[in-house]
Amino acid sequence: MFDVLVKRYKNDKDDLLIEVKSSVESPHVRMAVGQLFDYCFALRGDDDPHLAVLLPERPATGVVNYLQWMDVGLMWFEDEQLCTENDWLGTIIYER
């Protein structure tokens, strides 16, 4: 149904839905956001999960701004390191 659901990823209470895309292009990111909201609608639990997109690299500034505006987290890979600009996703980022 969805790419990743991390149960109780933050303080043992909040769930995180992650949609993974193989491209940083705007149409792929827009599709990811639509899919995330569709999954939320289908799950309809007591609490809405946090939402994030995982991309193969850091996208352009316009895509970053779009995701921030939609309140969707962003993760990407840089030299095999998982990165984010969202403080609330810092709990799942492993620092080497």
Image (cartoon, rainbow, N blue to C red):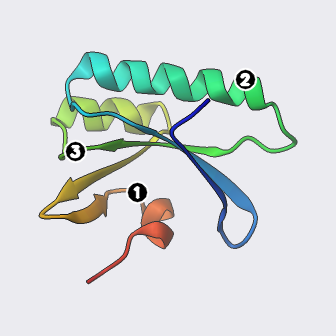
Residue 74 place in picture, x, y as percent: 37, 46
Mark earlier in primary sequence (1, 3): 3
| Residue plotted at (39% across, 34% down) | 67
Identity of the residue furthest to the right in this view: 46
In the drawing, does residue 38 fall left or right of residue 46? Answer: left
Q: Which residue is mark 2?
A: 41
In the drawing, does residue 93 fall left or right of residue 10? Answer: left
Residue 64 place in picture, x, y as percent: 28, 38
In the rendered view, tell whether residue 24 sits above or below residue 81: above
Q: Quadrant of the N terminus?
A: top right
| Residue plotted at (62% across, 21% down) | 38
- Identity of the amino acid at label 3? Pro
| Residue plotted at (68% across, 30% down) | 40
- Disc number placed over residue 86 in the picture, else none: 1
Identity of the residue furthest to the left in this view: 79
- Identity of the amino acid at label 1? Asn
Quick one: 68 or 2, which is closer to the camera? 2
- Identity of the amino acid at label 2? Phe
In the rendered view, tell whether residue 11 sits above or below residue 66: below
* Image label count: 3
Q: Which residue is mark 3?
A: 56
In the drawing, does residue 95 fall left or right of residue 62? Answer: right
Q: Quadrant of residue 44?
A: top right
Q: Quadrant of the C terminus?
A: bottom left
User: Between marks 2 and 3, how big is the CA–CA gap?
Assistant: 26 Å
Mark earlier in primary sequence (2, 3): 2
Identity of the residue furthest to the front in this view: 1
Mark 3 burial class by Cα count in 10 Å: few <14, some 14-19, many 20+: some
| Residue plotted at (64% across, 27% down) | 39
CB under 8 Å between discs 2 and 3: no
